Amino acid sequence: KVRFDTDHHGRFGGDNFMEGNLDTHMISAFGMNVSTLVSNTNASLSTEEGDGFGVALLDFVTGLANRAVVPHVLSLSLGSLSAYSCDLLCAEAAKTRKVSRGECEAYLQSQRQVCMFKSEAQVARINHGLMALGLRGVSVLGSSGDGGSHWSFGPFRGAGRVPSVLNEVGCAFSFPIFPSPSPYMA
């Protein structure tokens, strides 16, 4: 009873195909004979590799909350450093005077799935969308994403001073991720 509600279903061997396929199989196995709806908003690099992801997630949760029929459970398997974390990381990096805030932000956007939300205001709007789903009776479940924090993937890499400074700063703070810590997710 698995069906898709988006045109983009992923492609075999594609970046998130295996993870999405595993999630769908696990949900179907635990909820035997339960209708499972799969939505894949990862239709381009901009919705997976940079801060375009936040736009796609906001569109998805607000669109879902406005549907005539909503699911009983929404399971999200995704995550990135929160907008707050990315702002803190670059603010602290700039305080070292070894890199500018602009250099830091540009570097982070070049890194895969590190800073995928444009601002704390956008995160607040996503939280409102998740709250609207909860008010409609949807239980929103989520994990911390692939790693829980950037450092589970390893240190920032590359030549130059930016990755070095970010690794230094990264060891001095705890950086929250998003969306799993949202008060509207379980």
Image: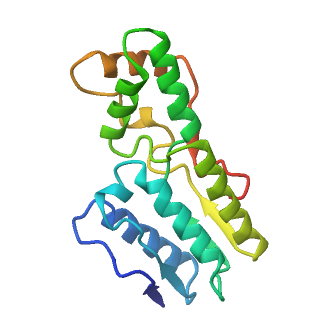
The percent coordinates of residue 133 (x first, y second) are 70, 71
Work out whether 100 lies above or below 133. above
The percent coordinates of residue 177 (x first, y second) are 56, 42
Q: Is residue 181 visible?
A: yes
At x 73%, y 52%, the residue is: 183
* Left or right: 33, with 10 as reference point: right
Please identify the quadrant where the C terminus is shown.
Answer: bottom right
At x 23%, y 71%, the residue is: 12
Name the residue furthest right. Answer: 135
* Left or right: 76, with 105 as reference point: right
At x 59%, y 68%, the residue is: 61
- Which sits in the foreground, 1 or 184? 184
The percent coordinates of residue 126 (x first, y second) are 62, 58
Work out whether 42 lies above or below 99. below
Q: Is residue 186 visible?
A: no
- Which sits in the foreground, 159 or 148? 159
* Left or right: 33, with 109 as reference point: right
Q: How is the image coloured?
A: rainbow
Which of the 4 image quarters holds residue 3?
Answer: bottom left
Which of the 4 image quarters holds residue 93?
Answer: top left
Name the residue furthest top. Answer: 97
- Which sits in the foreground, 117 or 139? 117
| Number of numbered discs on residues | 0
At x 66%, y 64%, the residue is: 129
Work out whether 131 lies above or below 96. below
